[in-house]
Image (tube, helix red, strand yellow):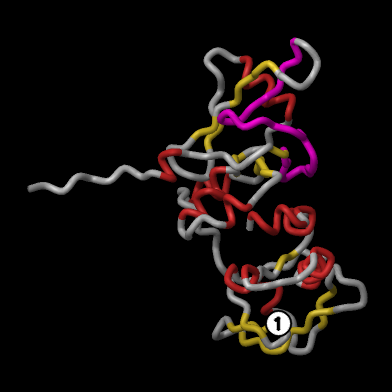
Amino acid sequence: MAALLQISPELILSPDSTFFAIRDETISNLSLPPHLLKDLLKFHTSPSKLTFQDLLNKPKNTCLQTLLQEKNLTVTKVDKEQMILEINGVNSQYFELKWVLHRKQLILMDSVTIFAPAELSYVASSPSPLLEKIVMVHLVPGRWSYKQLLAASSSSPATPLPTLVPDVDLQITKVNSSTKKENEEILCVNGVEITAPDVLYSDGFIIHRISRPIAIPKLLHPRVRPMSG
């Protein structure tokens, strides 16, 4: 997920498109130049918003338009009773979001704020399931613009931003910049500078570029219960 956001976030986060997600192990084993990888993502993205039920209602051999010019996907197998669907001969399964959130919270979360690191090698090298938690730490329910983050940092006490990891909040602080104009302040999220605010946004999401991934000690060094005896 982190890699896809870095390469082409507008494909995945468009509210009116459908993304056929490629398995992590497949993506990690690919060796493609950036322009071909982007074409691959476009080929897995339909400009139409399609639920799983919508796809099940499609007759066999239905063509699905993609964002890759003149390249379509095809419904090659469909069985409503067994809930089986194949796109281009590949079994497509419907996965509900498996965030560690209460279902009611998921339903209410109709927008998200993303803090996107410029360099993702630290994230990509992290083992699973730690990788998932690191990505989730960079996602905050609700749409927080830079102006709103600035206001949150000025409140007393500063307003914490809950992430998709339970009991892990982000703190927005203002610090003096050593490289910008004298006395000019910059915003940081857990000590990481927001280098490009509001770089991409819609009604459902907003992305802020940050200088590096956000490190959460309790994720990297989980507390271990001591053994008795």
- Residue type highlighted by circle 1: Ile
Q: Residue at x 73, y 28 (%)?
A: 146
Q: Does residue 188 appear in the picture of this structure?
A: yes
Q: Residue at x 50, y 50 (%)?
A: 133
- Left or right of 65? Residue 5 is left
Circle 1 packing at 10 Å, graded few (<14), some (14-19), many (20+), is many
Q: Residue at x 78, y 56 (%)?
A: 8
Residue furthest top as drawn: 183
- Left or right of 181? Residue 4 is left
On whether residue 205 falls in the magenta region, the answer is yes
Range drawn in magenta: 183-208
Q: Does residue 45 appear in the picture of this structure?
A: no
Q: Secondary structure at mark 1?
A: strand
Q: Is residue 159 above or below residue 210?
A: above
Q: Is residue 41 above or below residue 78?
A: above
The quadrant holding residue 60 is: bottom right
